[in-house]
Image (cartoon, rainbow, N blue to C red):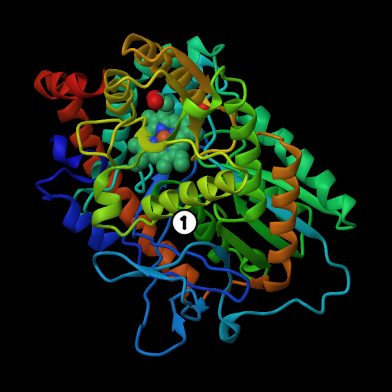
Amino acid sequence: MDAILYGGGGGGVISGSILRNSTLKSSRSCPKARCVTSLSSHSSDRLQDFDKPRFEAFSMSSTNSTDKRTNSLGGSYLPSPLQKRNSSGQVFCSVGVCTYADSVMDSHSHAKEDKVGVLLLNLGGPETLHDVQPFLFNLFADPDIIRLPRLFQFLQWPLAKLISVLRAPKSKEGYAAIGGGSPLRKITDEQAHALKTALEAKNIPVNVYVGMRYWYPFTEEAIQQIKRDKITRLVVLPLYPQYSISTTGSSIRVLQSIFREDAYLSRLPLSIIQSWYQRAGYINSMADLIEKEVNKFANPGEVMIFFSAHGVPLTYVEDAGDPYKDQMEECIFLIMQELKARGICNDHTLAYQSRVGPVQWLKPYTDEVLVELGHKGVKSLLAVPVSFVSEHIETLEEIDMEYKHLALESGIENWGRVPALNCTSSFIMDLADAVVEALPSAVAMSTTSSITEEADYDIVRYFVKMLFGSILASVLLLSPKMILAFRSHLL
Ligand SMILES: C=CC1=C(C)c2cc3[nH]c(cc4nc(cc5[nH]c(cc1n2)c(C)c5CCC(=O)O)C(CCC(=O)O)=C4C)c(C)c3C=C
Ligand SMILES: [Fe+2]
């Protein structure tokens, strides 16, 4: 049973099938920059608090035989020297603006009155302790978070229910320790407001929307508002600097599923900024924050700069071709290069935090490295959260409380932590520049297959899933052995 969770363990019983169903297929490079696009699966997911089943049926493929690559959404890209290959030979590249092939797109570039929208995508977080379990349900019901082989996908919701119920007490403790809820919505709203102001200062009037993946305001709600506002051009900006299947990939999958089922949205010109960790503005903003915090130590030169990134299960990177680890390492390299250029030549290291469940995650693990460094005699350490641009439970509770305590216990004497970028003005200015750069390449995604046929097929699948899911949920929830097995890994 353990192996089913989070994409399967070393045995790979589950992960092979998972990968066949939902694999990072290819990436596209666009004139301005580079990007990763994306994966998708024949799966459905459900938002417990957005009481509407959603149906998704994408298949994206790539043809590597010519210079111009395509996917089934009609996306195209030209190979770039900056692309990389993973161990399975899949191509991906670092960053950029994703667009779709001219052949199946309607360009609205001649529209008389452009009404520009920017959609910020983020994870979302529970606002009260009461929200924690349903929030966790939505997270674990995401097939990009718990990746089941097609045969077992009917288990997604019962498993999500079970895991969310078992995980909730531990999560609630964490949220209680940071004031009873996640600050993500508030900070993301502030970032949206600051971005709007920055774009208006550049003479680009925009509406900025916030769409969360697992909590309010859900991406679906934001998109409905975009429709009501009759936006004519949209830039999609996930607030994750580095691309992961589990974050940007998941959010874009939802977006695509909504867009392709809607006549207006499928004709709306859009640009998706898939990752932006190597933008000079972002790198400089991170370097500014680090430089400021390093200089607060009594002996700045001896501070170990400790980058701590949110982890992902190892199978995402090794089997599914998630570029997250590569992008993270490149990002850290660029930040350190910038710091060196400023004469800050401190030692640094990267580790991964926040693992959940019994499978292997990206290593080294933050907690283990902290203990090792303490034992090796490191006395001053500056923690730098690097996978997220707002304060959240992992910075405020895990780093500031748990890891700090562990570090001090292990012999580290001087502890510091770099704040998240939040609304740092140089960072917001850079996001505004990214939006401006993305605008000209906005083109519409149009559907190529019959929506009605797919919807009929999906409704049948939905009811079959519900039936089997309910039977299995009852069996699982009534099995004390199963509950014990989960408990030991989640608590
Ligand atoms: C780049 C950022 C993130 C990646 C990659 C990511 C992957 C990932 N996360 C989980 C499980 C959980 N994540 C939780 C909270 C959470 N995750 C991120 C970011 C990334 N997750 C953020 C910013 C937050 C916090 C939101 C907030 O409320 O402040 C949680 C809930 C908290 C907890 O119980 O620890 C879980 C669970 C998985 C399984 C995963 C990759 C597969
Ligand atoms: Fe997470």
Q: Residue at x 45, y 80 (%)?
A: 70
The residue carrying mark 1 is: 253
The structure residue drawn at horizontal position 29% and vertical position 32%, both measured from the top left corner, is 365
Pick the front one: 196 or 275: 275
User: Looking at the figure, which quarter contains the C terminus?
Assistant: top left
Quadrant in the rendering for residue 290: top right
| Quarter assignment of residue 355 | top left
Of residues 65 and 458, the one nearer the viewer is: 65
Q: Position of residue 288 (x, y in %)?
A: 65, 38
State the image coordinates of residue 29 (x, y, percent, origin top left). Answer: 51, 73
At horizontal 60% and vertical 63% (from top left) the residue drawn is: 262
Is residue 101 left or right of 250 when viewed as pictured?
A: right
Q: Horizontal placement of 141 versus 101: left or right?
A: left
**Where in the figure is residue 277, as x and y percent of width and height?**
54, 52
Q: Can residue 120 be seen in this view?
A: no
Front residue (pair 262, 413) = 413
Q: Is residue 56 above or below residue 7?
A: below
Screen quadrant of the N terminus: top left
Q: Is residue 59 left or right of residue 282?
A: left
Please state which amino acid type lies under the numbered disc 1.
Arg
Circle 1 Cα neighbour tier, 10 Å, few/some/many (<14 / 14–19 / ≥20): many
**Rendered position, 78 above or below 8:** below
> Please, what secondary structure does the residue beneath circle 1 have?
helix
Q: Where is residue 194 in the image (x, y as percent from the top left)?
A: 78, 40
Please say if 70 is above or below 113. below
Q: Looking at the picture, tell me which residue is in the foreground, 272 or 156.
A: 272
Residue 86: name its quadrant.
Answer: bottom left
